[in-house]
Image: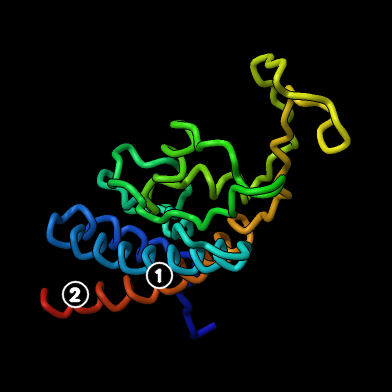
Amino acid sequence: MFGLEIENSVVLEQKKILEQALSTNPRTQKALQKLIRRVIMDAREKVSRGARSKMDSDPRHTAEAVRTSVYKRILGANVNIYNSRKAHGKNNYVPTRKGSTGRGGNRRSVSPITNRIMSYAPLDRGFVLRWINSGVKGRNISFQENTRRKVDKWNKHPNTGNRGSIAPRNFFEGSGKRALAVAADELSGLIDKELEVILNKTK
């Protein structure tokens, strides 16, 4: 036997060691974090499009509430629909209300709580994305007893209300996993190029 081969596993292990050594260099670490931020933002945009495709309309730009985090202590990142730790202002969108005459239309004034929820800025509406993704069961609520509310053919239970339900759309698992798989492949190629540039500088 006159030929010798280096096993693929050995090459990959040495490559891993080299990457870890280089990533401890502050300048190299910043370069790698820049690459991670680049691919994770592309993934975020794909997840946002996935969320938008599951909504009939998005006048308050709720799909923009998809967030990203780039880790500082280790090399990595994530895409999420958790609430932000800080508020981002208010949304000035006001839906068109129906007329107030006759039995139709919105005759009740909007409550302060509803006003607050409706005014959340796009980046603060992650809770809405979670509702759309996981769904919400139908809920019945009770109003304060009021004898002015009469039982008639339109209103069988005048002191209760139905908040309806939301069917789960599961956009996050589908579009999120696909987007991160593409991001991982792209990041691997970008890191290889970056390492090649760094090694060429050290020669």
Label 1 is placed on what type of residue? Asp
Q: Nearer the viewer, residue 58 or 192?
A: 58
The residue that appears at 47% across and 72% down in the rendered structure is: 185
Question: Who is closer to the viewer here, 88 or 35?
Answer: 88
The answer to which quarter of the image holds residue 56 is bottom right
Identified at 29% across, 62% down, the residue is: 19
Instruction: Please give the label number shown on residue 199.
Output: 2
| Residue 18 spot, x, y in % from top left | 28, 62
Label 1 SS: helix
Q: Amino acid at mark 2?
A: Leu
- Give how far apart the Cα atoms at labels 2 and 1 are: 28 Å
Residue 161, quarter of the rendered image: top right
Q: Earlier in the sequence, mark 2 or mark 1?
A: 1
Q: Quadrant of the N terminus?
A: bottom right
Mark 2 residue element: helix
Q: Is residue 114 above or below residue 28?
A: above
For residue 107, side relative to residue 47 (left or right): right
Q: Position of residue 58 (x, y in %)?
A: 52, 62
- Label drawn at residue 42: 1
Give percent across and percent down for residue 147.
72, 15
Pointer 2 local density, CA inside 10 Å: few below 14, some 14–19, many at least 20: few
- Front-most of residues 76 and 16: 76
